[in-house]
Every structure is written in C-alpha cells, then in structure tokens.
Amino acid sequence: MPSSTITGRDPQTGRSLSLLVEDGILTRVDASHEHTDLFVSAGLIDLQVNGCGGFDVNDPHLSEETILALVDVILARGVTTFAPTIITAPEEKICTALHVISEACRTHPRVASCISFVHVEGPHISPVDGYRGAHPSEWVRPPSIGEFHRWQHAGGGIVGIVTLSPHWPESPAYIAALCERGVHVSIGHTHASPEQIRLAVDAGARMSTHLGNGIAPELARHHNPIWAQLGDDRLTATFIADGHHLPLDMLRSMVRAKGVERTVLVSDSVALAGMPPGIYNTPVGGRVEMLAGGKLCVYGSELLAGSTASLAQCVSHMVNAAGVPLHQALAMATSNPARFVGGRGRLVPGSRADLIRFRWENEMLIEEVWLAGERVELRASLMAKDLTS
C-alpha cells in the first residue's frame, strides 16, 4: 500500500495537521500550513450496535451478506470499529449469530477490519420488569461458564464483551473466569445491590452498559445500582447520548461523576437507525413507530424501542446540549472506547490509520473515512426495503 498524507484541523486547537500514513499505519503527525475547513479525527468506535440501515444482528435469518452490508452502512456513519451486539436469546440462536459473524470476518477483510469482537448483552441479566428492558423474559438465565465456552466455540473466540447483572450468585466466579480469558465484563440491566456490584467489580468487571437505561423507573433514593456504579472509579460507563434515552440534566450529572476519561458514548443503534420515519415491524420489538425526530417507540405508546442515532449524532448532542468541548466528546467515541479494543482510536504514530474527516455545522457531518489507511467509498444509501408495514 503506498504512503499518503491526510490533512485536517485538530478538533482541540483548530490548527491544521498533516498525517502521514504508511502501510495502513499512522507514522507521523505534524503541524501543517494547509488551510481546510474539515476536521480530522481517529475513526469512531462503537461498542454497542444491534443494527443499522435495516440490517439487524439479531435477525433470526442473519447471514454473512447482512453483516457485510451492515459494515458498509456503519462506515458511512464514520464508525471504523464496532461491536455487533447480540441480545438475550436461546443459546442456539446466540451461537448461530456468533458463527455467522465469525465467518463474515474470516471471508471479508473489510468486516474483519471493522469488527474486533462481538458484544453479548445478556442473557444473564435481571429478569425483573423495567430492569430487563426489551429483552425477552423467557430466555433470561443465570451465568454458565459452560455456555460461554459453547459461544466461543461457535464464534471462534469472537466474544469480547459480555453484559450481565451481578445479582446472580454465580456472577463473581463467572466474571473472574471471563476476565482471565481476556473478555471485558460490563454491568447492565441489573437490580443488583451495591454490595453485589462491588463484588462484580472486585472480580474484574470494568464497564457499565448504557448507564441510566435498562433500569426501573422508580428506585430507592440511596441504595440503588446507579449510585454504586457512578461512585466506583474502576468502572467506565457507556451512555446513549441521543437526546431521548437520558434527560439532559441526568446525562450531564452522570458524565461529571464519571469524568471524561471514564465516559464512553455508544449508539446502541437498532436496525431502524438511518431509516425514514414510519411504522415498522422488526425482529426485536415487534411493531414500532419511528417519529420525525428519530425517537423510536413501541407502536401506540411512549415506550422507547431502541436508539436510531449514529455515534456522530451522539457526539454532536454532547457538544450542543451537554456543553462538552468537541475534542472531549470525540474522545468519548474514540480514544476512550479504544482502551477496550487496542491499537486504534488515537492520532498518534503507531496507531492503525482508521481516520475520518468531518465538517462541523452544529453537528458532525462525515465527509471521508479511511480504514487501515485505505479510503472507503461511502455507501450511506444502503437500506433494507422490507421493514415498512
């Protein structure tokens, strides 16, 4: 691969930078005198993607072609690394999805470049209504290291994050076993006590999944899962900053509590992300309605049925609504999640040259994307056509 030079403005200083890319690696970062209106950044990293543009990781008929198409849609949104996220389901369905994603990575180099691992959200979550969220109650079950081994066998070791509730008696031993195998454990969809959460963190859990969501609408004011996770500096929290999932005052307070360095933005996008407003039937959630502002609800109600925002939109919301400086909001979607991926997400020599150039017009507008130093032909128009009802 020939060397190339990419220029753009530093989101922190506004000054122009010149990036030298050789063999897919960023080798130099220098000041530049070339004027441009475009900012340059490491590619966005999304640790929780259920689907996008009509393509669903949890589709019972998941295929390699679906994963390849999903990668193209995600790249068009400026995300160069993402974790396909499988929710609570029968073990056979989870294993099948892991096998399909693993085969797509083996067959398609672009897929392998974008997908470092899979995030399994559940099935070891709270069975209690409210905390369980939209996960089907009939498939919630306690942790089993035997089941985890079968997941890894089916997917060739592709599972990299597991979200669970630490209220299960088996949780501490299960968490320790996964951490020994290099798998990140995240706390989410939980009604666990503060003591159970502390035991989970002592065992190796280091993340909180979409903190503030997947939780009951009413909580004890002092002893509840949110305070226990906010107060533990060992935990990095992920947030869905789409303007719908968390009230602005709550989002601001949580980010201040965790600090910029322990905050990660995720889209938690579902298949309808990127689709036009309307009424849809989906494999997960059933009959839903997409409103004009991107809010997705169970049809006929105000209950949220998932996120439709892109990670770039979440960054924009953090800047415009939460008042976070652009470079800090970008860190929440690049270098911070990169701690769980490695080798990317930063504009430093030696990092993989996953890069984006974007225009800022009160929101991030993605203009160009490079994956491992290769410029990507963006295919934002890809959409499934069979979800409307």
Image (cartoon, rainbow, N blue to C red):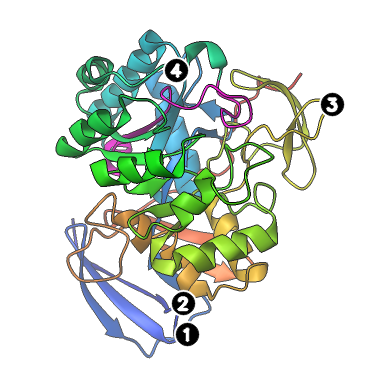
Which of these two is toward me, 211 or 288? Answer: 211
User: Which residue type does callout 2 highlight?
Assistant: Pro
Residue assigned mark 4: 62
Q: Within the magenta stretch, is there residue 104?
A: no
**Disc 1 from disc 3: Cα separation:** 46 Å
**Disc 4 from disc 2: Cα separation:** 38 Å
Residue assigned mark 1: 14
The mark that comes first in sequence, 4 or 2, is: 2
Q: Nearer the viewer, mark 4 or mark 3?
A: 3
Compared across the picture, whether 355 is left or right of 26 comes to: right
Characterize the local packing of mark 4: few (<14), some (14-19) or many (20 or more) Cα atoms within 10 angstroms.
Answer: some
User: Which residue type does callout 1 highlight?
Assistant: Gly
Q: Within the magenta stretch, is there residue 111?
A: yes
Residue assigned mark 3: 300
User: How many dots with numbers?
Assistant: 4
Label of residue 356 in the image: none
Residue 138 image offset from top left, x and y in percent: 53, 10
Characterize the local packing of mark 1: few (<14), some (14-19) or many (20 or more) Cα atoms within 10 angstroms.
Answer: few
The mark that comes first in sequence, 1 or 4, is: 1
The secondary structure making up most of the magenta span is loop
Which residues are the magenta region? 110-135
**Disc 3 from disc 2: Cα separation:** 42 Å
Residue 203 image offset from top left, x and y in percent: 24, 41
Q: Pointers 4 and 3 in contact (CB under 8 A)?
A: no
Dot 2: what SS?
Answer: loop
Residue assigned mark 2: 11
Which residue appears at 25% of the width and 28% of the height?
A: 174
